[in-house]
Image (cartoon, grey):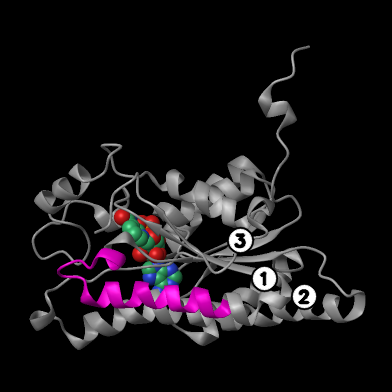
Amino acid sequence: MAVTIQDTHVQQLSDRVAVITGAGRGIGRACAELLVGEGASVLINDVDDAPAEEALAACEAIRPGAAAIFVGSVTKRQDTDAMMRAAVARFGKLDILVNNAGISRDKVVHQMSDEAWDLVIDVNLKGTFNCIRSAAPYLRDPAKAELERDGRVRYHRKIVNFFSTAAIRGNPGQVNYAAAKMGNVGITRTIAQEWGRFCINVNAVAPGFTNTRMTQPKEAGADLGVPADQAEAMIKRIPFGRPAEPIDVARVVLFFCGPLSDFVTGQELNVSGGMQIP
Ligand SMILES: NC(=O)c1ccc[n+]([C@@H]2O[C@H](COP(=O)([O-])OP(=O)(O)OC[C@H]3O[C@@H](n4cnc5c(N)ncnc54)[C@H](O)[C@@H]3O)[C@@H](O)[C@H]2O)c1
């Protein structure tokens, strides 16, 4: 019988447990499905319960029993503490944290409200901090114990943070989002150094323009979305001539979650189809 690539494929994440925030939709959901397909057990977090349930059903179809959901907000420490506890209670440990949850509330600076500033900073930036701090007892402490007991860790544990090409470039109407996302670069470089000796890799991805709810055509008065003319202009700057799909970004997240990136930490990678950032 012919051997296919499928037959010989070694799952990159068998036996690993991951928490993915904001995994009910878009890129986070693609990450959940891809990681489950690669053998991981995944706790799907979202602030909205219906999309989280849909993501769970999609993961169940890939590998029954490999996923669970935790509905709660990354902006609240009680929620992120309970999220990490839930992952460990359900799957026995925690190896991977993907800080994907994000939101936008665009306005030019002189029209931006305190509420829009605070929400975007709280979800995109404080959410990353909350999750890393809440994960410390399950990511850092076991690695430290292994180091003290055996002189080495058993394997690399992983954190993947999210920032954005819009933040690197600067994007009119997104002062809150750009500030939050570049803050995640600072978090990435800092925790990579704090937890490097425990072999916890901390890297970040910057999606370019990606087809999700966040970039849907913006209706007048809507909170989310991108005006059609701006979307068109952004897509024109992508050499591949199309926006990313969530799976394009999820594959790079998988690289940072898996063993192929074990000697890479404190790094940022753009997933933008070659869009040049001036
Ligand atoms: N779509 C793009 O073009 C693009 C570009 C650059 C970066 N990003 C980043 O990629 C990540 C994923 O975004 P997406 O495009 O898939 O958007 P999306 O809106 O499709 O998904 C984001 C998910 O995060 C969830 N979420 C929002 N607030 C939350 C909270 N407080 N706690 C938990 N979950 C929360 C939402 O409910 C949603 O399901 C975000 O960090 C975003 O900033 C997206």
Residues tagged 1 and 2 counted as in contact (Cβ below 8 A):
yes
Question: Mark 1, residues whose alpha carbon is within 10 Å: few (<14), some, or many (≥20)?
Answer: many
Q: Quadrant of the C terminus?
A: bottom left
* Residue drawn at x 28%, y 72% as measured from the top left: 178
Q: Residue 264: which disc?
A: 3
According to the image, label 1 marks what residue?
A: 200
* Horizontal side of residue 177 vs 23, given as left or right: left
Residue 74 visible to the viewer: no
**What kind of element bears circle 3?**
loop
Disc 2 element: helix
Give the image quadrant in which the ligand numbered 1 is located. Answer: bottom left
What residue is drawn where x is 14% and y is 81%? 112
- The Cα–Cα distance between marks 1 and 2, rounded to whole angstroms, is 8 Å
Q: Magenta includes 183? A: yes
Specify the segment rendered in magenta: 167-191
Viewer-nearest residue: 98 or 83 = 98
Crowdedness near tag 2: few (<14), some (14–19) or many (≥20) residues, C-alpha within 10 Å: many
Prevalent SS, magenta region: helix
Q: Name the residue furthest top.
A: 1
Mark 1 or mark 2: whose residue is earlier in sequence: 2
Indicate the amino acid at tag 1: Ile
Secondary element type, mark 1: strand
Q: Position of residue 47 (x, y in %)?
A: 43, 70
Which sits earlier in the primary sequence, circle 3 or circle 1? 1
Q: Disc 3 residue type? A: Val
- Point out which mark residue 143 bears: 2
Pointer 2 with pointer 3, Cβ within 8 A? no
**Considering the image in quadrants, where does the N terminus appear?**
top right
Q: Is residue 210 left or right of residue 42?
A: left
Q: Earlier in the sequence, mark 2 or mark 3?
A: 2
